[in-house]
Image (cartoon, rainbow, N blue to C red):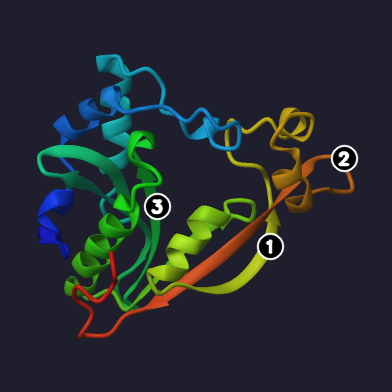
Amino acid sequence: MTHISQNVFEQGIVAVRPMRRADVDAFAVWGIHTDPLFRHFNLPRLSKGVADQMWAFLAGAPEERRPFAGLLGERVVASLIVRELDRAGGVGELGIILDPAWIGRGLGRRILAAFISVLATEGFRRLQLEVAGYNERAIAAYRAAGFAVLDEYWADPEPGMDVGALLEGPAADAVSPNVRLDAHGHYLMRTVRMERRLGPQTKDDITP
């Protein structure tokens, strides 16, 4: 299933389709996050072996997770996944990674709109996601896409995140309100859980 979202010609055509093995190779030319808050999201250098392993993980358990590619024209600009599948209940959890070179240009919202439309067509009725409490930009984008906050909880930091270094650097003001120590002195991060409920009419109903 491929969906093309609402598009303005000058912005380029946005579409979402099931991911293919070759799409993983496209990650090698993505930009990188320079903001210390998001550097842990930078993808590793992609040798063929690493790309093969990444694809094996993404596509290796279709009953648990399904990968999709977000496209701008022919360029792969987003990696999308729906996981924690509950087909009977029509529930899935979203994971979204956008090429850092395109952040802040409105592309993520258009890709998300197309992804939601694909999943609505496939029978999903509730979509959930989790986002770090400090990631105000992402939370605003998800709200604009119709997601509402379900709850918040404290969780282990995201893999690769050096909380101590962040608290000592220029990102400290953004991070510190969203961090606490557990009884053992380990850092915990505030995590926001969000949900959007879909109906049969869900199609191109998000302003890009």
Look at the numbered discs 2 and 3 and tell me whether their residues touch, using CB distance below 8 Å: no
| Picture quadrant of residue 6 | bottom left
Of callouts 1 and 2, the N-terminal one: 1
Disc 2/disc 3 C-alpha distance (Å) = 29 Å
Q: Is residue 84 above or below residue 71?
A: below
Q: Residue at x 56, y 73 (%)?
A: 149
Q: Amino acid at mark 3?
A: Gly
Q: Going 20% across and 38% down the picture, which residue do you hit? A: 76
Q: Quadrant of residue 93?
A: bottom left
Q: Which mark is residue 185?
A: 2
Q: CA distance from mark 1 to mark 2?
A: 17 Å
Which residue was labeled with disc 3? 95
Residue 26 x %, y %: 22, 28
Residue at image mark 1: 153
Q: Secondary structure at mark 2?
A: loop
Q: Are marks 1 and 3 in contact (CB under 8 Å)?
A: no
Q: Position of residue 207 (x, y in %)?
A: 29, 70
Q: Residue at position x 57%, y 35% from top?
A: 159
- The image shows residue 184 at horizontal and vertical percentages of 88, 42
Q: How many neighbours does mark 1 have within 10 angstroms: few (below 14), some (14-19), or many (20 or more)? A: few
